[in-house]
Image: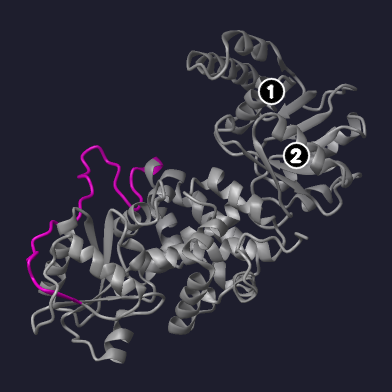
């Protein structure tokens, strides 16, 4: 196939490498002619590096480089180009004007694809004489390594085009997912679950960015915590995406943006690219460190409750050699699920100064998470950390909140994904596949919820909603129905 790629920036170069490596002839064009030569030299070097790492053979690298053809005019006439992929400035007018030129000079059979990450495909197509030939084809950076592509049909896209592009993409070894033309498409939309809830926790002073990131990594198994990730991508970019998707879904409570971002963006606290964000990247910046453990590891501990979480906590403490006994000096640990420690103290008459919550999600992880109320004695907190550290794990202390940190982050991740499935934006299988590749989560969000257990997840969401009264935590119909019907959370309602 002969493919024309317009835009010789980071994305255009990556798409060119992907297409040439797959055996396609690639015309590369840009409004700035000098950028084309630089891009071809860059791609040629990347192909040589791939050969050096034995990802492809030297012969295949040379052959792929020879398939790169510089083009002086992005809108040059051609009868041979079958697919155009646009990767230019993220501006509706710029993209629409380019496609208007292309539809006048390229045959009607040539498919026009936009690599937009945020603009509605339908709105770009509305500017064309024939919107049926336009489709979204959204790659992720770096294209050769991020093996996921979103195929986004507009409202008037010809029905034969999306499946043909899915086939083309999957023949190259990338996964293609078909996504409805909605704000954020699939992966950017799904990523709001983690980011928006992390900000909600920060707003409530449940923990600082370091504390939330540590729990996200050590308890949930994420590669990067949400604030580390936003510092890497740039808060200016992340905040714009959060706001855009929130507005696009008509200010959905589940996707609510934070009041914290505008001032941080205005102050230039973008992250790595400005030297300071949620963390400092100055050369002399001290590395982030958690508070040392100084408490009494031999202080007696009592576990409140008699459910599975309480039994699991007792086993873990026993294995660590903790002193399990009830006394007037004992630390009281209560596992909480979707509720607060304060509620347990009130309901069960627990001692206010000696009671702490513990997140059951953290029991089998490298980091145990305690929750302290305003009434908890600071000495009890120090001693509880020391007791939990007997097993060689880290111990974080957060402010008491419904569900603690990890539960709230996980519930939000699953809820946003379930909402995507509920609104038929993408199929469950595609949601899980795209999120694992595109966001690097250890599990697809719906499969992750299934690992927790549908009933247990629903009880978490009901507890969060009941305790806070905030509609952002309202359980999705997707989760509720599947639990009521005994179906897995990954079950597609279109399955027979």
In the depicted view, which residue is nearer to us: 274 or 340?
340
Q: Is residue 148 depicted above or below 12 in this figure?
A: below
Q: Is residue 111 left or right of residue 471?
A: right
**CA neighbours of label 1 inside 10 A, class few (<14), some (14 to 19), many (20+):** some
Seen from the viewer's position, the closer of residues 243 and 359 is 359
Q: Quick check: is 193 in the magenta stretch?
A: no
Residue 129: percent from left, percent from top: 91, 45
How many numbered marks have been drawn onto this rendered protein structure? 2
Neighbourhood count class around disc 2 (C-alpha, 10 Å): few under 14, some 14–19, many 20 upward: some
Residue corresponding to mark 1: 22
Q: Secondary structure at mark 1?
A: loop
Q: Main secondary structure of the magenta part?
A: loop
Q: Give me the residue at 66% from left, 57% from top.
A: 183
Q: Are marks 2 and 1 in contact (CB under 8 Å)?
A: no
Residue 350 image offset from top left, x and y in percent: 22, 87
| Residue 230 seen | yes
Identify which residue is drawn at 80% across, 43% down: 162
Q: Nearer the viewer, residue 8 or 463?
A: 463
* 99 on left or right of 344: right
Q: Quadrant of the C terminus?
A: bottom right
Task: Name the residue located 12 percent from the left edge and 78 percent from the top edge.
Answer: 330
Can residue 276 be found in the magenta stretch? yes
Q: Return the disc, 2 or 1, that comes first in the chain's sequence.
A: 1
Residue 430 rendering spot, x and y as whole percentages: 65, 50
Q: Bounds of the magenta span?
A: 273-302
Instruction: Name the quarter where the N terminus is drawn.
Output: top right
- In the drawing, what numbered circle is on residue 166? 2
Picture layout, residue 23 above or below residue 239: above
Q: Is residue 195 left or right of residue 437?
A: left
Is disc 2 placed on a helix, strand or loop? helix
C-alpha separation, residue under disc 2 versus residue under disc 1:
14 Å
Give residue 294's quadrant in the image. bottom left
């Amino acid at each position: 196939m002969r493919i024309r790629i317009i835009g010789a920036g980071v994305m255009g170069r990556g798409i060119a490498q992907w297409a040439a490596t797959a055996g396609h002839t690639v015309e590369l064009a840009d409004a700035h002619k000098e950028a084309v030569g630089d891009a071809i030299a860059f791609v040629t070097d990347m192909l040589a590096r791939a050969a050096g790492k034995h990802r492809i053979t030297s012969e295949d690298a040379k052959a792929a480089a020879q398939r790169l053809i510089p083009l002086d005019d992005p809108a040059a006439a051609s009868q041979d180009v079958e697919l155009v992929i646009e990767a230019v400035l993220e501006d509706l007018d710029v993209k629409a004007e380019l496609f208007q030129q292309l539809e006048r000079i390229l045959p009607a059979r040539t498919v026009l694809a936009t690599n937009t990450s945020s603009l509605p495909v339908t709105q770009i197509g509305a500017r064309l004489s024939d919107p049926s030939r336009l489709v979204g084809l959204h790659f992720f950076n770096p294209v050769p390594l991020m093996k996921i592509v979103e195929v986004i049909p507009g409202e008037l896209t010809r029905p034969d085009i999306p499946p043909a592009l899915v086939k083309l993409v999957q023949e190259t070894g990338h996964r293609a997912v078909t996504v409805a033309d909605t704000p954020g498409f699939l992966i950017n939309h799904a990523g709001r679950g983690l980011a928006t809830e992390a900000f909600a926790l920060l707003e409530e002073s449940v923990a600082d960015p370091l504390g939330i990131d540590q729990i996200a990594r050590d308890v949930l198994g994420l590669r990067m915590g949400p604030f580390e990730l936003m510092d890497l991508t740039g808060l200016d970019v992340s905040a714009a995406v959060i706001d855009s998707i929130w507005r696009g879904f008509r200010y959905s409570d589940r996707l609510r943006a934070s009041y914290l971002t505008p001032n941080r963006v205005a102050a230039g606290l973008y992250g790595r690219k400005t030297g300071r964000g949620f963390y400092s990247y100055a050369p002399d910046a001290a590395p982030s460190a958690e508070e040392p453990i100084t408490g009494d590891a031999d202080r007696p501990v009592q576990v409140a409750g008699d459910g599975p979480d309480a039994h699991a906590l007792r086993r873990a403490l026993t294995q660590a050699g903790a002193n399990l006994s009830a006394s007037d000096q004992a630390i009281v640990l209560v596992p909480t699920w979707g509720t607060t420690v304060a509620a347990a103290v009130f309901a069960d008459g627990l001692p206010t100064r000696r009671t702490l919550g513990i997140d059951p999600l953290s029991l089998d992880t490298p980091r145990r998470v305690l929750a302290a109320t305003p009434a908890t004695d600071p000495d009890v907190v120090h001693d509880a950390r020391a007791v939990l550290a007997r097993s060689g794990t880290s111990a974080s202390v957060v402010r008491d909140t419904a569900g603690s940190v990890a539960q709230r982050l996980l519930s939000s991740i699953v809820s946003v994904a379930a909402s995507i499935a509920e609104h038929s934006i993408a199929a469950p299988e595609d949601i899980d596949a795209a999120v694992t590749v595109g966001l690097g989560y250890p599990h697809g969000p719906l499969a992750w919820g299934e690992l927790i257990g549908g009933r247990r997840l629903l009880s978490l969401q009901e507890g969060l909603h009941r305790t806070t009264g905030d509609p952002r935590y309202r359980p999705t119909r997707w989760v509720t129905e599947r639990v009521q019907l005994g179906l897995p959370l990954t079950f597609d309602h279109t399955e027979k």
